[in-house]
Amino acid sequence: MTTRSLVDGTANFRDVAASPGVGSKRLKPGVFFRSDALVAVSARGLKQMGRLEVGTIIDLRSDPEVSAAPDVIPDDVRSVGIPLLQGRQDAPGGIDLLKLPALAQLYASLLEDNADDLVRVIGVVAEASGPTLVHCAAGKDRTGVVSALSLAAVGADRESIVADYAITESRLSGVWEQEQLRRLEAHGIPVSDALRELMVGSPPEAMDATLGVLEDRFGGAQQYLLDAGLGADRLEALRAKLLT
């Protein structure tokens, strides 16, 4: 498996079915992608996206994030904005830098406070006619929760879901991270260890804890989505789309 981003101008554009540890015999390749923001996609990247036949893009960023850094996408691709963490202080990733949460705490709050929006996202993934891309700013936190919820809902095992999440840090470390650090420094924001983890960290234990919250507090991903109003028909459509 290549560690190179599939689309030029991104750091973390990848096929979820190709993540290490994800059961490729069960997940269909080429139908569910995840990425960081598409603000710097090049002409070459647009052609690559076209070859992947991405038909629908779900942007999880807040309105201020989108306004400051709009996506660069092919003209014929449908873009759907479903903000998660909308209303948080406008900062990298939409997080209040003065009240940095632990990643597991952030993900648990996403599940607690954004059930309606998460159901909308999963519904679009399930019903989109072609390959679908989900992204936020880094493709790590909001995208990570959506990817985990989708995989858990179709029966992927816990190790596979954690593996899909954990690879993100290796994608963001390096050029992407340095660009973000320069941006923070330009705004006079000191970079602490906690802030760096929030920006690029994807420790396996954070996602493992999140899956524990799904099971212990909500009865699992399927029950979470059904209780939030997804509908059994859309859950079945998600299975049909993502599974072989």
Image: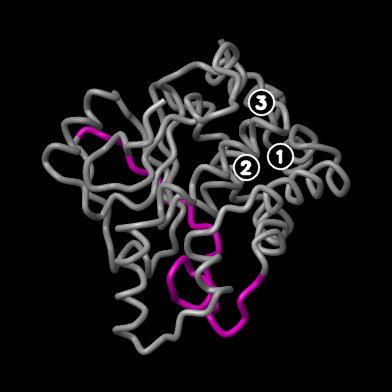
Q: CA distance from mark 2 to mark 1?
A: 7 Å
User: Looking at the image, do the residues carrying marks 1 and 3 touch, with CB atoms under 8 Å apart?
Assistant: no
Q: Residues within 10 Å of mark 1 (few under 14, many from 20)?
A: some
Q: Amino acid at mark 2?
A: Val
Drawn side of residue 67 relative to residue 155, left or right: left
User: Looking at the image, do the residues carrying marks 2 and 1 touch, with CB atoms under 8 Å apart?
Assistant: yes
Q: Amino acid at mark 3?
A: Leu
The answer to if 85 sits in the magenta stretch is: yes
The answer to if 142 sits in the magenta stretch is: no
Q: Which residue is mark 1?
A: 229
Q: Is residue 192 above or below residue 234?
A: below
Q: Residues within 10 Å of mark 3 (few under 14, many from 20)?
A: many
Question: Which comes before the other along the chain, label 2 or label 1?
Answer: 2
Q: Which residue is mark 3?
A: 235
Residue 244 screen position, x and y as percent: 56, 10
Q: Which residue is mark 2?
A: 119
Q: Is residue 155 above or below residue 218?
A: above
User: Looking at the image, do the residues carrying marks 2 and 3 touch, with CB atoms under 8 Å apart?
Assistant: no
Q: Residues within 10 Å of mark 2 (few under 14, many from 20)?
A: many
**Magenta range:** 76-101
- Tell me the element at label 1: loop
Q: How is the image coloured?
A: one colour
State the quadrant of the N terminus: top left
Q: Residue at x 15, y 45 (%)?
A: 42
Q: Amino acid at mark 1?
A: Gly
- Tell me the element at label 2: helix
Residue 133 screen position, x and y as percent: 40, 36
Q: CA distance from mark 1 to mark 3?
A: 10 Å
What main secondary structure does the magenta stretch of the protein show? loop
Question: Which comes before the other along the chain, label 2 or label 3?
Answer: 2
